Image: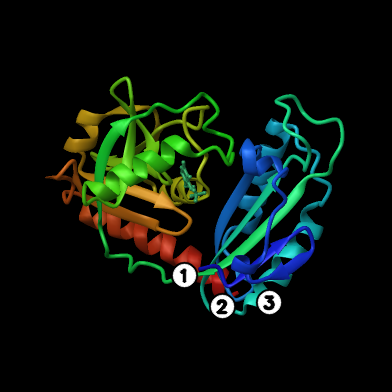
Amino acid sequence: MPAIGWYNGMLGKPAEMSVPMNDRAVYFGDGCYEACVAFGTRVFALDAHFDRFYNSLRALEIPFSEDRAALKAILTGCLQAADEPCAVLYWQASRATAPRTHAFPGSGEPNLLVTVTPKTLLPPERTLRLVTTEDVRYAMCNVKTLNLIPNILANEHAKRSGADEAVFVRSGFVTEGSHTNVHILQDGALITHPTDNRILPGVTRRILLDLCRENGVPVAERPFTTKELTNADEVLITSSTLGVRRAETVDGVPVGGRAETLYKRLLTAYGEVFSREMRA
Ligand code: PLP
């Protein structure tokens, strides 16, 4: 359960707070969001999350008025109030509170909702079980919108299959996970779907790619097939809350395990970046 909720200036326990029925997030999911890991008031890769958030707002033409400094002050206030050693900091902006019309309403200000939820991070050595599923999403996956129905159904499918995460496949090519990015290590190189409109440009993905380049690991940003996934030397999963970790099975069949040294080098490098920023 979130420890703290905040909605348009009101702070409280989320279960005791309410949102107007006419918030467009309620009936259209007309908004965008971010989720980050926080230790106390220190947030990992906050600038990168801000970059993506303001990109999403621009793509959706949401006239959000708080700039980065004002938003950071609100988020820090929420983290202070929650006082959690480790938490997921979530925030979303919706277009407005207004009667339901598909076109943008002529009036109404964007709404900001924030939650801080205590979190225990999985140990890095915990591997993931994946299941593949058809990617039935639209062509705006690069925008972090609130519209997540295919992701929800895919993740539930994974759960019912006894797996941890669903991997979307479009026309035989792996795009990403239901709430993660998916990469493979093959012959010493990292291969990952390019950041087009078929995937979310993950903050953790970006950090991993930078680490590959710093460590002399070649990176190919190109789509790869399910066959390449199942035959890969390693299958890597990234997200803000999972960090960088590897998969042990895809559709119940063991995968990877053939580039352990390289995987561990990247994992260590990521751990160092994370610790440096969260301790600094
Ligand atoms: N892809 C999708 C669809 C996601 O929802 C997420 C995270 O929520 C990611 C990838 C990973 O992104 P990040 O590393 O920024 O958490």
Q: Residues within 10 Å of mark 3 (few under 14, many from 20)?
A: some
Question: Which sits in the foreground, 48 or 27?
Answer: 27
Q: Residue at x 53, y 49 (%)?
A: 203
Report x, y in % for residue 53.
66, 45
Q: Which residue is mark 3?
A: 80
Q: Quadrant of the C terminus?
A: bottom right
In the structure shown, which secondary structural element does the residue marked by tag 3 occupy?
helix
Displayed quadrant of residue 100: top right
Say which amino acid is labelled 2.
Glu
Say which amino acid is labelled 1.
Lys
Residue 7 visible here:
yes
Q: Residues within 10 Å of mark 2 (few under 14, many from 20)?
A: some
**Disc 2 + disc 3, Cβ < 8 Å:** no
In the image, taking residue 232 as reference, residue 241 lies left or right, namely right
Q: Which residue is mark 2?
A: 84
Residue 215 visible here:
no
Question: Which sits in the foreground, 242 or 192?
Answer: 242
Checking the image for residue 119, the label placed there is: 1
In the structure shown, which secondary structural element does the residue marked by tag 2 occupy?
loop
Task: Give the Cα distance between marks 1 and 2.
Answer: 9 Å
